[in-house]
Image (spheres, rainbow, N blue to C red):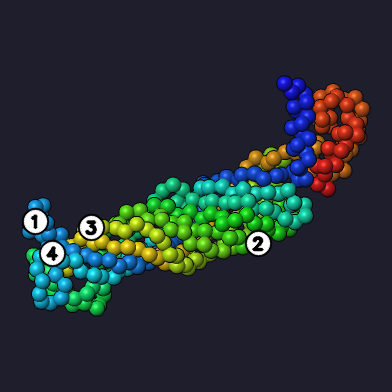
Amino acid sequence: MIPESLARRVLLVTILSNLSAATLAQDLFVESKESIVDQSLVVSVPFDGTLIGDYDAKTNPDGTQTRPGLFGGSGNIPVEYSAVFAIDSPASQSQPSGLITIDAVDIADGILGIDGFEFDLLSGGSVSVGVDLAIVLQTFRTYSPFSIYPGGFEIPIPLPSGTILSLVIRSESPADVLVAPVGDTYEFDSVLPGIIAVEIDFGAGAQAFEIPFAVPFTGTLEIGASETVLVLSSEVEVNGDQEVEFPPFEEIPLELPTFPPGDETAGVLLGGTITSVAATADLSVQIIASGQTSQNPADFNDDGIVNGADLGFMISAWGVCIGCPEDLNFDGVVNGSDLGLFIAAWTG
């Protein structure tokens, strides 16, 4: 068994040998009550497939039957179509949640590492959105009710509202940003690689997709003796097309207006495949994130820097000193061994 004193010594040596700043990698959690996101989202979802009347000899004998063309055929026959779902989320405001992981090991050299971030813009909630369907059909006719649908032109069909189930901004990869000291804080203005991840249900079940984009951020970082606070601001408009591999959907009920117009509708079942998604998002992000500052054991005066002032404390405690914070290796003596550990933790 390793003696407790030796275990503590090994742990401290490990910490200090990798420590060159008061703050290493740490998670800063979003202060939701103090953070705000203004957002709007427009999503266009093209798809194609077939529709067929909702007639069923056993369960719906009075249902609609579909037949391609103006003449010929019998029974209930599928009809080809192409269509676009349009999802429009009005401007709204939310209080996000999430975290950002920073690495300030090189901040004295003007570099702040952003190891990763994930901001849930809806903070676990959801948003109802308007959904419209524009469908282009081949020429066909229906029975029960009778209607003729000339092909080749777009038919707008209002649908029940859909739901944005999730809207998340997250980092695509770690990045370093240049920072400049301003008083007690560090300021930065940078662009980070990110991803907008969206999950939407527009009536065909939940569908998730991602759009990569560059996230412009300005911000400040304040490293206090006990707390680190990061303030981020971003104004961004994202436009993107993304190929997707959603499973085919089947038998989604839809009521088509009849031609010529009347009081009845033709009940059909929609099936198809979605292969791409286009989205436009306007975001205004104001985020405050904080976390407990990681402490450096060699920062004896707790000012966030290991420098000459701390060296003065070590020199004053030189020699036998049981339980002194300057005894970095816990051997009861402040000497050259402790000085070596101190130099390894120096930030200047």
Task: Using the image, tell me which numbered label, if any, was put on residue 76.
Answer: 4
Quadrant containing the N terminus is top right
Whole-angstrom CA distance, mark 2 to mark 4, is 62 Å
**Nearest the eye: 273 or 207:** 273
The amino acid beneath tag 1 is Ala
- Residue 135 coordinates in the image, percent (x, y): 26, 70
Question: x and y percent of residue 172 in the render?
Answer: 56, 57
Q: Please name the residue shown 19% across and 76% down the image.
A: 139
Mark 2 or mark 4, which has the lower sequence index? 4
Q: Which residue is mark 3?
A: 251
- Tag 4: amino acid: Asn
1 or 4: tag closer to the N-terminus: 1
How far separated are the C-alphas under marks 1 and 3? 16 Å
Residue type at tag 2 = Asp
Q: Which residue is mark 1?
A: 57
Task: First in sequence, mark 2 or 1: give its number.
Answer: 1
Q: Residue at x 51, y 55 (%)?
A: 169
Q: Which is closer to the viewer, label 1 or label 3?
A: 1
Residue at the disc numbered 2: 189
- In the rendered image of this protein, does residue 192 appear above or below residue 326? below
